[in-house]
Amino acid sequence: MTAEATAGAEDFVFTPENRAKADAVIAKYPAGCQASAVLPLLDLAQRQNGGWISRAVMDHVGEMLDMAPIRVYEVATFYTMLNLEPVGRYHVQLCRTTPCWLRGSDALREACREELGVGLGGTTEDGLFTLTEVECLGACVNAPMVQINDHFYEDLDPARMKDILRALRDGTPPPPGPQTGRQTSAPASGPTTLSEL
C-alpha cells in the first residue's frame, strides 16, 4: 500500500480548497437537510484521498453534515462508485450487465487479466491498476464498455482493451468514448438519418 493510500486510513480533513467546495455543496440544501449532500461530499473526499474512502473519511463527512456515522456508512457501502479500500491509479470498472455480457464482456475480463496479471478485485503490484466488475454504467448501446476513473471506453474488443491498458501504463491515455470510430451512440453500421452534421 502506498503512502498516499494509507494517508486517509487514520485521519482525514478536507483541504481548504475542498472544504470550500464541500461548503458550496452543503449550501444547496435547505437548513436541516444537509444530509442530502452526503454522496457528493463522499465523492469529493474520495478524490482527495487517492481514490478511496476510509472510516476516518466517512466520520469527517458525517461530522460536517451532523449525521450519525452509521448513516454515512450505509451510503458508502451501498454505492459501488465509492471504494472502501485503496485502488490503483487507474480503476478499471468492467460492466457485466446483460448488454455488455452479450457483446463480450467476459472476453474483456480475460483480456484485462492477461494484460494486468490480476483478477477481479486485484491491484497490480505497481499500484497502477485495480480491476473490478460493476453493474450497468449506462452505455448499453455501445457495449461492451469499461469505465476507467471518470472516462468511458466503449465498443471494445479484447485487443483494443489491451491497447488501452498499455497506453495508460505508458502514460499516454487514449481518448475516451467509442473505440470503433462511431459518433457517440450512432448505429454501429453508421447513421441512417440526419447523416449531415
Image: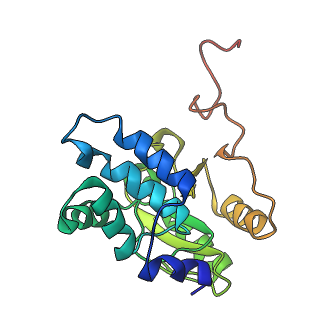
Nearer to me, 76 or 123:
76
Give x and y (percent) for residue 55: 34, 75
Task: Please count the marks in the image.
Answer: 0
Residue at figure coordinates x 71%, y 12% from the top left: 196
The image shows residue 157, relative to residue 186, as above or below, that is below
Q: Which quarter of the rendering shows the C terminus?
A: top right
Q: State left or right for residue 49 relative to residue 101.
A: right
Nearer to me, 163 or 5:
5
Give x and y (percent) for residue 190: 65, 27
Residue 49 appears in the figure:
yes
Q: State left or right for residue 65 relative to residue 181.
A: left
Q: Which quarter of the rendering shows the N terminus?
A: bottom right
The image shows residue 194, relative to residue 187, as above or below, that is above
Give x and y (percent) for residue 163: 75, 63
Nearer to me, 134 or 66:
66
Which quadrant of the view contains residue 81?
bottom left
Residue 145 appears in the figure:
no
Residue at figure coordinates x 62%, y 74% from the top left: 129
Which quadrant of the view contains residue 69?
bottom left
Q: State left or right for residue 159 relative to residue 132.
A: right
Q: State left or right for residue 80 relative to residue 116.
A: left
Give x and y (percent) for residue 128: 66, 75
The image shows residue 71, relative to residue 169, as above or below, that is above
